[in-house]
Amino acid sequence: MTVHSDVSLVRPRSRLRLALGREANFGDLAFRRITALFAASVIVLLVWIALEMGRASKLSLAKFGLGFITASDWDPVRDHYGALPFIYGTVVSSILALCISVPISLGIAIYLSELAHPRLRTPMGFLVELLAAVPSVVYGLWGIFALCPWLRETVEPVLEKTLGFLPLFQGPHQGFGMLAGGIILAIMITPTVSSVSREVLHAVPHSLREGAIGLGATRWEVVRVAVLPYAKSGLVGAVILGLGRALGETMAITMVIGNRSEISTSLFAPSYTMASVIANEFTEATGQLYLSALAEVGLVLFFVTVLLNVLARVLVWRVGKLPEGGRL
Amino acid sequence: MFFGRRRLLVLAAGLSFGCNKAASPTENKAGSAPSPVPSQAKPVALNGAGATFPNPLYSKWISEYNKQFPNIKINYQPIGSGGGIRQIIAGTVDFGATDAPMKDDEVKQAPGKLFHIPATIGAVVISYKVPEVTAPLKLSPEVLADIYLGKITKWNDPKIAADNTDATLPAKEISVVYRTDGSGTTNVFTDYLSAVSSEWKVKVGAGKSVKWPVGLGAKGNDGVTGQLTSTPYTIGYIERAYATQNKLPMTELKNKSGKFVAPTTAAMSAAAEGIEMPPELYVSLVNSAAEAAYPITGYSYMLVYADAKDPAKGEAIAKYIWWSLHDGQKFAESLDYAPLPATVVTAVEARLKELTAGRKKLL
């Protein structure tokens, strides 16, 4: 790999600048300060949100303590709140979505950047990105009227017949449930993951591909040996973006997941996510403790999101340290 | 947000808003008492927020009222009963609206005395999708409670068959659907189940969101309607308007006096007539003893401060509610609500005359 020389892009330093040091240029200084301010605003916003939600959930924090995240009883009538089923639902539906979406998205990205005819690349990529523009309520309605009946009548019976020995695929076929939620999320994050992955693959220097071809590699070997290892940290980043979207998605998944605050091993069973319970119950919630418990669900969602993102970040660093050309 | 059919209807009504510049205020004489004419000298803007359940009717009222009195601008945000109560307590709106009466701790938080004003009557219907059943299904309260408790799980259960001797009931699992978002609809429905089943009252109770023993949760009336149309062998409860507009079958429910009654507006009014209105002007209408009553019926209320801070706004609200109480009631039926009974209208009239601003009476 060659390192591009950027010397030609730098203007020769003015004498004044040389005399006064790096930041003498007022424009540069202002630019630096302003962008720093923007960057800091993200941190301030995050801290502020966390504090604000902590304040709103004070009552519930005091009453339930840690029991809030380990109890699975959510009963507004009796003012008993435990968020475990929602945490479970959010995490499992997002992971399920990644399991479905990542292979498909990578396939799309590899096809579009490596294999597709150049004339096909732009329109195909455009179509994939168009999926991201569909409002989530439309996905939800499609879920109710097309996906769920199809799952109930066709997919779930087949899964039970073939893989029914696993506890994942047992129980009554209802269509609405964790499986439907995971599939809807997978469809919604695929455009994000695949278009970012495509850009990442696009950035892989051509010299790498040429080198691999020169060594007699097949198309598959070029991708496996030269392209993917170079792009791996970027690809993990794309997956994190998808995960973020899956964790926070509310409308579409609420419409298909069945909204029952129960933990079940079966993917056919209804479940519930943290974002859904807030969206469903906040508007009509009355009573201080109830509102506070809903705010605490928000707080928990915030921390789960941060935690998963940190985990994924750590993964990127670990992957980044592996020797290039090593395992992905 | 997804627009329900009813909201679209309202939107259409709202579009005609403004085209009709100033219909004469004397044109409308449908009410029993003439509505007091608001002073038109200065334009007044009123803000309200609360229940979604009566929103189609409120929107119709607001647009009709604005046609008659163009200087009175009213803005109603259907953000949910809970939000309506929170906002009227905080004083960010001029009037609130709720389906369930305020709780004691909420009343204590309010800076002044709040009046509940019954505005209209709505009903929750039980709908189902059972292709084999052609005539309206009949359900007794015990059977309905047992279905929602998970004790009756098959459509051909002998308890269901006992009330439907002519129907062919399939040996299929009942797929139970409930509203997952907090709603006045759920409140009325669970209030009814608590009234008719002691087991329900102990195990689950009544509220806008409850811990359901069985079933799938769908979001909003639209979501439940969607499951009722797409999933065979489903049972669910929805607002009456959703069932009529989507032509869904509605069960006839056995009321307290032992009659199977379909959810007609007449049966809803009958429910209100069968229950005496207490002086605080809020009461549950479920399981009414009247012979013709449909049992899952409820009032929807507006919330106003007894003593208005701003006399001009207070006067405008009082006159607007007076208008809705008389002229407004005739719009109820076409939008699937029932008009208030005459005794309730008289009681509300008396309450409106108690409204003040400072020491001054508003009406």
Image: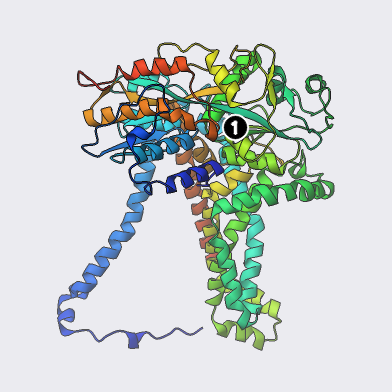
On the rendered structure, is A285 left or right of A126? left
Residue drawn at (52%, 59%) of the image: A241
Looking at the picture, tell me which residue is in the foreground, A68 or B226: B226
Chain on which label 1 sits = B
Disc 1 marks a residue whose amino acid type is Arg
Q: Where residue A39 sits: x, y (%)?
A: 33, 60
Measured as percent of width and height from the top left, residue A251 is found at 54, 47
A176 lies left or right of A48: right
Q: Is residue A327 visible?
A: no
- Measured as percent of width and height from the top left, residue A283 is found at 46, 36
Q: Between A268 and B343, which is closer to the camera in this rendering?
A: B343
Residue beneath label 1, please? Answer: B240
Q: Which residue shows up at 49% across the image and 11% down it?
A: B276
Q: What residue is drawn where x is 40% and y is 40%?
A: B63
Where is residue B68, by image quadrant?
top left
Query: What's the residue at 53%, 47% (across, down)?
Result: B2
